[in-house]
Amino acid sequence: MTRVQVLLSLAAIAMIVGLWFAFTAPVDAFQGEYSRIINVHVPSMWLAFLAFGVVAFGSIMWLIRKKPRWDRLAEASAEIGVLFSAIGLFTGMAWGEAVWGRAWDWGDARLATTAVMFFVYVGYLALRRATPDPEARARRSAILGTIAVIQVPLVYFSVNMFRTLHQTQTIRPDGAAMPDEMLVAMLINVAVFTFLYIALMVARIDVAKAEASAAQTQDLAGDAVKAPLLSEVEDV
Amino acid sequence: MSEQVFVIGVFAISYGAIFGYSVYLHLRRSRVKD
């Protein structure tokens, strides 16, 4: 088994443990079974924040050092961040439909800022795809990756700045706004998802490295085996 | 009962997306020779 396979297998086992905690924890008296969705919603949004923070770190490091590995780190983290923010949006909408009676409200600051953040990072991935030159791609995406991270604190604190539909932070400096058993289950799932992020990052960076190396080999081989044009051949 | 089915469905779609992404990475990696 490769290192990537070992990590992903361990992450799968950790996710089963996380699921067990999610489905055995007590439920909220008002929300009922729907309160279990918090065990996938909060960890997903936490991962999105973490991933976009890592994108900014990789981007700044690339701008300073200009090493491809920092670009690969930012690229991998952006892709995983987009995946988990999509899951966070989906689970939030499902929970909202069940508990609030509406899946979406553009007037809500948390929902609107999260949607904008999601689309900005989809744009980040699109920008990468649209730029074939590796140097230009790394530079453009590093600038966007550095600026776009401003949205992370904006999304996180939006619930305190604008009191709309979404509840305020669950974990605050003065304590958590939920019973201990529910909090433990949620924090275990946060830890599980963090480990999953590491495993997916290792797998994604491995793909990027292999593809970069294959592209380099192909370029060299391409030159070596390319048939000369008739006009380039003398004495025919 | 319908609450449980709804919640299980939400978990299944979320975890399915993560599993799908892992499979996508595996397939993309296996297309590239070392």
Image (cartoon, helix red, strand yellow):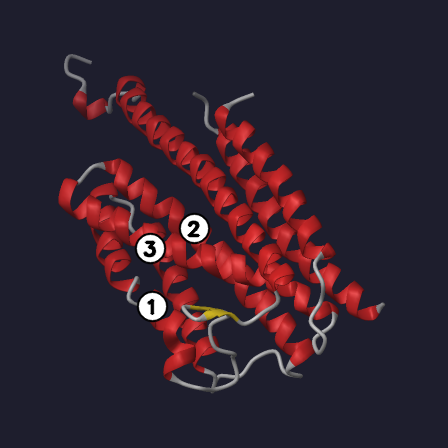
**Residue with the mark numbered 1:** A153
**Residue with the mark numbered 2:** A79
Where, quadrant-wise, is the N terminus of chain B in this rendering?
Answer: bottom right
**Residue with the mark numbered 3:** A53
Mark 2 closeness class: few <14, some 14–19, many ≥20 residues within 10 Å: many
Q: Chain of mark 1?
A: A
Number of callouts: 3
Mark positioned earlier in the residue sequence (2 or 1): 2
Q: Amino acid at mark 1?
A: Pro
- Same subunit, labels 3 and 2: the answer reads yes
Where, quadrant-wise, is the C terminus of chain B in this rendering?
Answer: top left
Q: Residue at x 44, y 57 (%)?
A: A48
Element assignment for label 3: helix
- Real-space Cα separation, disc 1 to disc 3, in angstroms: 10 Å
Quadrant position of residue A229: top left
Along the line of sight, which residue is nearer the eye, A134 or A77?
Answer: A77
> Residue A136's spot in the image, x, y percent?
21, 48
Is A145 situated above or below A202? below
> Residue A125's spot in the image, x, y percent?
38, 54
> Residue A144's spot in the image, x, y percent?
26, 59
Q: Residue at x 54, y 72 (%)?
A: A177
Instruction: Decide if residue A101 is on the left or right side of residue A45.
Output: right
Q: Residue at x 72, y 63 (%)?
A: A26
Element assignment for label 2: helix
Element assignment for label 1: helix
Q: Amino acid at mark 2?
A: Glu
Quadrant position of residue A146: bottom left
